Image (cartoon, grey):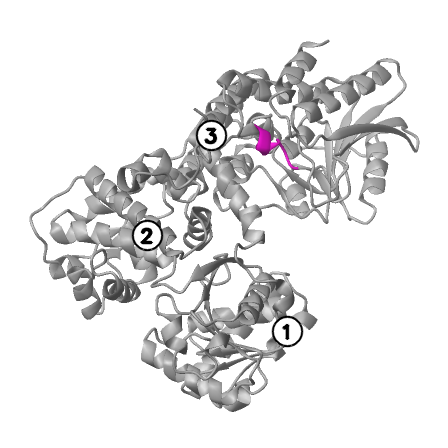
């Protein structure tokens, strides 16, 4: 038994539940180019169960390469290739097994095993081809990088190296081979920028344009065309020419840019991006063996760290829990929605209108207090549709059809008399919203769902004066509507099952992540953010310098600092939500008097950004009245984390959401909370904050944490 086989046999015992991928070898005669050995990766399941690489799967590929190697040595084949089952090439390592590893030497063996098998493709005595026929991620991308040539399907929907996003590095060759194939600048884009931008995926044509693939073919006959192209390469009819790689200042500049991107996204709090960049930097010398060894060490270290566990936990939340919302009623109870009404035509309402018409493709009508506002809202939607047309996202016929579906009217009876779903997006004041619902109830059919986009007000109170309060539901979007995945679907005291089921069905068509939330002040995201923001502002009010308080949360690697987040939300909105919560929970929430002065003065930001670095606006500084208690960054951070832990504990006790996992899902998808934290509850557990504040953990021992 070879060393590689022994290594994989030992590792396989650590992955008892591996979904094993087979590696089938078949032979084809290429026109004028001899016999071709094609290895097909297939786990025997449908395309909803993507092909992965665990130890036994790697062993199967190793055995297939054994066969191909013998055939090549005997002169029986002229080339070999790798492809995947329909719709899937391969999506990388079996993460279910990786998170179970408890010893560094076992983690090291996984890295070494992948390298050992994949390198054999490079060592074969005949040219090798990777045919990226479908989704390829992580190790699926990497196995193809060892081949001599690559083709990609134009229909390929997703191609990425997502490891940094999860808390790893592309450790089976990606950090070393990719920059040596396409240059450091493009490699940094794929490995660092795309990963840290919410795991952005590449399409088939982008893969070709980046130089990862040498040729691209349409999906319908992709494999046939790829084999014909391979034959033309083997006969010399087609010559593959790749640009020379810049191994000078351009390489160093690309790595420096990658570090700047990592700093802006994780602020040094998560090691994976920096380990990947170190390997890319050293790959400049072209020493592949040295690079592979560095990848092995990085993988071993990161697999044994908390970041990966949190990353996998977060990944499972958005990939699995998000698709089956806890507490959602039977979808058979949902009613059809063939027309949507929106009360309001401001920016938020217009964004909602655009989303509804794009996803549902049904008539959408906006109303507002005057025609000028309505016209502006409708014009916004039409302009955005034109942008989609300009970008090639839709064709002219669809653009015309979508624009024709969006209208406006001053007359609510005319606008909503046949609507199935009406959502209000008016001023955040309870009396105003109650009046809107009363007007709607008078003109809409009995079956119409009445939804509210309120961010903090009681939906039960909002519906309390209606004849049919059971059809009122919270439908809380996050800004920007098109980008933020979360929808907090709020069940008021009298919301019925049919209304709730319809809300979830609509949310699914909108391609949103839905979480069922109890009607409680500010629901989930705004309640947590307001609590922690209140602690930061409270420290400032007491005398801590703004810049000190603002840096306090930096070790968490949040996407933005508290004051920058406050500026994004808007001081007026933040102050209003704080006031709502202060009325409900005066023992824990309060409105900052200094923030109140900022709002009263009409200031829209606390910071000025003229120099590129946020600085406190001198006019804001003059408004502040502070005490003489100065806290350190650590003291502010501990105070904020303790407050968050307490608030989440209370929310769970109150049944605002079903479990701590729903809090994490809300923060990840609604507030951009980093994957490397796993949301917030795993971080609080790991840091010992939950035990200190509540005397218990949020999650079971071992979940999103390093095994003891």
Q: Residues within 10 Å of mark 1 (few under 14, many from 20)?
A: few
Q: Which residues are magenta?
A: 91-97
Q: Is residue 634 left or right of residue 340?
A: left
Q: Nearer the viewer, residue 355 or 378?
A: 355
State the image coordinates of residue 77 (x, y, percent, origin top left). 87, 22
Mark 1 vs 2, N-terminal side: 1
Query: For numbered disc 3, what is the local secondary structure?
Result: helix
Q: Residue at x 33, y 53 (%)?
A: 528
Residue 62 covered by magenta stretch: no
Numbered mark located on residue 336 in the image: 1
Q: Is residue 30 above or below residue 348?
A: above
Q: Is residue 218 above or below residue 417?
A: above
Query: For numbered disc 1, what is the local secondary structure?
Result: loop
Q: Is residue 450 left or right of residue 615?
A: right
State the image coordinates of residue 364 (x, y, percent, origin top left). 56, 77
Nearer mark to the viewer, of 1 and 3: 1
Q: Which residue is mark 3?
A: 277
């Amino acid at each position: 038994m070879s060393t590689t086989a022994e290594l994989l046999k030992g590792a396989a015992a650590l992955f008892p539940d591996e979904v094993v991928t087979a590696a089938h070898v078949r032979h084809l005669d290429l026109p004028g180019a001899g016999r071709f050995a094609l290895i097909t990766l297939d786990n025997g399941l449908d395309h909803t169960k993507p092909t992965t690489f665990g130890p036994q799967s790697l062993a199967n590929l190793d055995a297939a390469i054994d066969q191909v190697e013998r055939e090549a040595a005997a002169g029986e084949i002229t080339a070999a290739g790798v492809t995947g089952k329909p719709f899937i090439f391969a999506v990388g390592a079996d993460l279910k097994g990786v998170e179970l590893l408890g010893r560094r030497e076992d983690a090291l063996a996984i890295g070494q095993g992948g390298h050992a098998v994949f390198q054999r493709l490079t060592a074969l005595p005949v040219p090798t081809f990777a045919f990226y026929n479908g989704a390829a991620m992580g190790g699926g991308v990497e196995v193809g990088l060892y081949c001599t040539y690559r083709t990609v399907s134009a229909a390929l929907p997703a191609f990425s190296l997502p490891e940094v996003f999860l808390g790893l590095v592309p450790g089976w060759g990606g950090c070393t081979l990719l920059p040596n194939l396409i240059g450091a600048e493009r490699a940094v884009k794929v490995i660092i920028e795309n990963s840290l931008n919410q795991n952005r995926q590449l399409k088939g044509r982008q893969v070709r344009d980046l130089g990862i693939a040498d040729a691209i073919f349409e999906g319908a006959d992709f494999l046939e065309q790829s084999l014909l192209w391979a034959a033309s390469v083997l006969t010399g009819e087609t010559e593959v020419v790749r640009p020379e790689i810049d191994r000078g200042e351009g390489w160093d500049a690309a790595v420096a840019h990658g570090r700047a991107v990592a700093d802006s996204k994780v602020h040094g709090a998560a090691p994976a991006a920096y380990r990947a960049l170190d390997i890319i930097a050293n790959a400049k010398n072209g020493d592949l063996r040295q690079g592979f060894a560095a990848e092995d060490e990085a993988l071993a270290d990161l697999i044994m760290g908390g970041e990966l566990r949190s990353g996998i936990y977060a990944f499972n939340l958005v990939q699995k829990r998000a698709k089956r919302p806890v507490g959602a009623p039977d979808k058979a109870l949902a009613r059809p929605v063939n027309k949507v009404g929106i009360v309001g035509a401001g920016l938020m309402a217009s964004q909602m209108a655009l989303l509804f018409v794009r996803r549902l493709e049904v008539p959408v009508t906006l109303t507002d207090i005057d025609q000028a506002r309505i016209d502006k809202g409708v014009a916004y939607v039409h302009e955005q549709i034109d942008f989609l047309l300009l970008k090639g996202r839709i064709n002219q016929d669809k653009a015309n059809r979508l624009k024709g579906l969006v209208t406006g009217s001053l007359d609510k009876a005319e606008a909503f008399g046949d609507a199935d779903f009406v959502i209000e997006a008016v001023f955040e004041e309870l009396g105003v919203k109650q009046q809107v619902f009363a007007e709607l109830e008078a003109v809409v059919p009995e079956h119409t769902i009445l939804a509210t986009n309120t961010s903090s007000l009681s939906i039960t109170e909002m519906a309390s004066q209606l004849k049919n309060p059971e059809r009122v539901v919270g439908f809380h979007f996050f800004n920007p509507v098109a980008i933020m995945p979360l929808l907090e679907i709020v069940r008021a005291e009298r919301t019925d099952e049919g209304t709730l089921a319809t809300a979830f069905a609509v949310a699914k068509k909108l391609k949103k992540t839905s979480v069922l939330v109890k009607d409680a002040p500010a629901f989930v995201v705004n309640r947590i953010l307001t609590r922690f923001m209140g602690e930061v502002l409270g420290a400032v009010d007491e005398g801590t310098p703004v810049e000190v308080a603002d840096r306090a949360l930096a070790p968490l690697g949040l996407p933005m600092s508290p004051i920058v987040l406050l500026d994004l939300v808007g001081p007026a909105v933040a102050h209003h939500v704080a006031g709502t919560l202060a009325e409900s929970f005066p023992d824990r929430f309060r409105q900052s008097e200094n923030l109140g002065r900022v709002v009263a003065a009409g200031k829209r930001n606390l910071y000025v950004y003229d120099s590129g670095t946020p600085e406190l606006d001198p006019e804001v500084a003059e408004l502040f009245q502070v005490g003489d208690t100065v806290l350190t960054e650590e003291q502010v951070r501990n105070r904020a984390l303790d407050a968050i832990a307490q608030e989440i504990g209370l929310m769970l006790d109150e049944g605002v959401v079903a479990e701590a996992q729903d809090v994490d899902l809300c923060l990840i998808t609604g507030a951009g909370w980093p994957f490397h934290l796993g949301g917030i509850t795993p971080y609080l557990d790991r840091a010992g904050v939950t035990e200190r504040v509540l005397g218990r953990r949020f999650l079971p021992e071992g979940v999103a944490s390093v095994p003891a």
